[in-house]
Image (cartoon, helix red, strand yellow):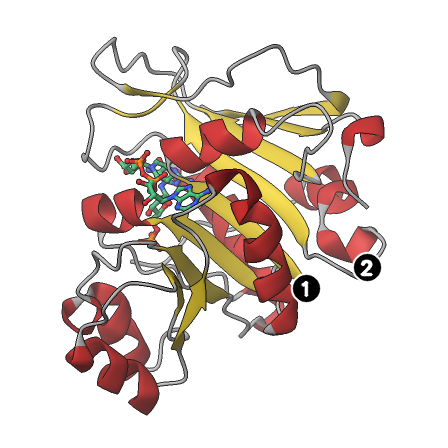
Amino acid sequence: MSLLPLPPSLIPFLEPYLPRSNLVLPNRPFVTLTYAQSLDSRIAAKPGAQTKISHQETKTMTHYLRSEHDGIMVGIGTVLADDPKLNCRFVENGNTHSPRPIVLDPYAKWTYHKSQLSEIYNIGQGLAPYILVDESVQLNPLDVATLQQQDGKHIRLPLIKNRQQNWDYILKALVDNGIRSVMIEGGAVIINELLSYGADNYIIDSLIVTIGPVFLGNQGVEVSPTSHVDLEDVKWWTGQQDSVLCATVPKAFKLD
Ligand SMILES: NC(=O)C1=CN([C@@H]2O[C@H](COP(=O)(O)OP(=O)(O)OC[C@H]3O[C@@H](n4cnc5c(N)ncnc54)[C@H](O)[C@@H]3O)[C@@H](O)[C@H]2O)C=CC1
Ligand SMILES: Nc1nc(O)c(N)c(N[C@@H]2O[C@H](COP(=O)(O)O)[C@@H](O)[C@H]2O)n1
């Protein structure tokens, strides 16, 4: 299904938060954390369920954001729940860029060769993923062979032993593999972890949150950091149904 046109006012609204408007960081990619939540801070109606929250016009915004990043990352929980495409369907202004899908799957739970994402690659509508797995896990030979034929790969990192350091390894691996900007879409474990990462270690350069006019209820999958986070550079956009918050995390807390 084709997307609605991008509301023109979103272009100047988003501009200051895009990687292209910000300094290129030498040792890690520019990180945008972006997701859609309900009024009661839920990103899905129940665990493992894919739940539509965004209006079509903010869905277009998500694809516009995908066109502005080298990579798009989700966790294995999201992949198993949504079987996502993780490509870019924003084709306005002749855009043909699709970001590199990156899946954080430390225990190699994903059967990649049967996924929609593999099919998307096979029909020429997106790139094959980089799958981040722990150094110790055994890989499915069919997945390895499929990724070898496509242009994706498994990247082995020490992800299981000391989770505290994982984001350092993950971000370095992305830069080492040519990913200079990444948008992280979720799911809840990753969002909560990044928002809670610690006062000295915030790694989010831009935060872009779509808020839909719905309550998903207390069985829903909640996003909430472990403690207080004050945002800076806050701007709001309101569309036909949704509002979008753009912000940065306090600069004093950022890694360099
Ligand atoms: N509304 C929205 O914008 C979005 C909603 N979702 C929803 O979120 C739900 C899935 O969320 P979750 O189950 O929380 O899964 P998730 O996608 O956050 O994946 C969690 C898994 O990722 C791995 N992981 C996360 N952080 C790690 C780290 N630092 N080191 C190593 N491994 C790490 C672990 O295996 C962990 O179990 C689905 O229902 C999906 O539909 C997902 C993305 C966006
Ligand atoms: N922007 C947005 N709005 C919602 O209502 C959502 N449920 C999501 N979910 C995210 O989008 C991914 C699906 O991507 P594809 O359309 O399959 O490429 C899903 O995996 C979540 O990350 N996003």
Tag 1's secondary structure?
A: loop
Q: Nearer the viewer, residue 156 or 162?
A: 162
Ligand 2: image quarter: top left
Residue tagged 2: 24
Q: Nearer the viewer, residue 53 or 26?
A: 26
Circle 2: is it few (<14), some (14-19), or many (20+) Cα within 10 Å?
few
* Residue at left offset 55%, top offset 50%: 183
- The answer to which of marks 1 and 2 sits earlier in the sequence is 2
**Place of residue 105 in the rendered image (x, y in percent of width and height, measured from the top left):** 33, 54
Q: Is residue 93 left or right of residue 136?
A: right
The answer to whether residue 123 is seen in the rendering is: no
- Residue 137 against residue 32 in the figure, above or below: below
Q: Nearer the viewer, residue 138 or 231?
A: 138
Could you say which quadrant of the image residue 194 lies in?
top right
**Place of residue 224 in the rendered image (x, y in percent of width and height, measured from the top left):** 46, 17
Going by the numbered disc 2, the residue's amino acid type is: Val
Spatial CA span between label 1 and label 2: 8 Å
Going by the numbered disc 1, the residue's amino acid type is: Arg
Could you say which quadrant of the image residue 92 lies in?
bottom right
Q: Residue furthest bottom?
A: 149
- Residue 190 against residue 103 in the figure, above or below: above
* Residue at left offset 46%, top offset 57%: 158
Tag 2's secondary structure?
A: loop
Residue tagged 1: 180
Circle 1: is it few (<14), some (14-19), or many (20+) Cα within 10 Å?
many
User: In which quadrant will I find the N terminus?
Assistant: bottom left
**Place of residue 73 in the rendered image (x, y in percent of width and height, measured from the top left):** 46, 53
Is the C-beta separation of discs 1 and 2 under 8 Å?
Answer: yes
* Residue at left offset 33%, top offset 15%: 214
**Place of residue 64 in the rendered image (x, y in percent of width and height, measured from the top left):** 56, 54
